[in-house]
Image (spheres, rainbow, N blue to C red):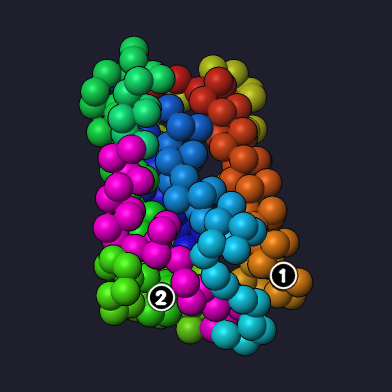
Amino acid sequence: MFIGHYAPAVLATGMAAGTGRLKLWQAFVGAQLVDYVWAGLIMAGVEKGRVTPGFTEASALDLYHMPYTHSLGMAVVWAVVAAVIFGLVFRKQAKAGAVIFGLVVLSHWFMDLIVHVPDLPLWFGTDKYGFGLWNNRMLSFPLEVGIFVLAMLYYLKNTKPKGKAGRIWPIVLIGLMVTIQFIGNFGAPPNSMKEVGITAWILYTLFASLAFMVDRTRTAQ
């Protein structure tokens, strides 16, 4: 998934609105933390993938070797490590915030399971799984956009704007993310896996930065 990964993050933030346990920008980082690492390992040649136009309708990426980031066992490891670090860095957000953050990180694997072809192992050297919804772009695109937008609407329902900016930033965030999802699914394939990795870092950081602006301009109902 791409923007669909953010749906569990946004829902978790909306449910925690007013408690101070999890901020939107933190949840955005957690949703794609695994892919931050994946992008680095892809560019370093540790994990493997190739750009194959037409590989699936929605994605040209053949991700044939990524056990360190996208096996279920390692997803659990990343989630636990992320929760511990979160708890140490953001002590004021309590242990509950760390647990929620860890669960957001773990959600990444299960969201990928829906759309990926079978390229997600349970552990190193095991069989790979994936329901393959990317094989049908007309199903996967509205699914990703739909669950993300619905999650954002839930978050907006549980928060209120501090001023005009609190109404504008969510629109900017949603509009940009949906547009990039459309380009990713219907546009030209990337030129190389290095380009994919660099673009991933840029976009994930941009989205988290915009989520930070939403945080700053909205408060709990």
Q: What range of the chain is rendered magenta? A: 56-81
Contact between marks 2 and 1 (CB within 8 A): the answer is no
Q: Is residue 137 left or right of residue 198?
A: left
Q: Which residue is mark 1?
A: 192
Q: Is residue 203 left or right of residue 139?
A: right
Whether residue 15 is in magenta: the answer is: no
Residue 91, position as x, y percentages in the image: 34, 15
Q: CA distance from mark 2 to mark 1?
A: 19 Å
Q: Secondary structure at mark 2?
A: loop
For the point 52% across and 64% down, the residue is: 47
Q: Is residue 50 above or below residue 214?
A: below
Q: Secondary structure at mark 1?
A: loop
Residue 197, position as x, y percentages in the image: 64, 57
The answer to which of 44 and 121 lies nearer the viewer is 44
Q: Which residue is mark 2?
A: 119
Residue 38, position as x, y percentages in the image: 52, 56
Q: Is residue 5 above or below residue 85?
A: below
Residue 170 shows in the view: no
The answer to which of 59 and 37 lies nearer the viewer is 37
Residue 57, position as x, y percentages in the image: 57, 83
Residue 186, quarter of picture:
bottom right
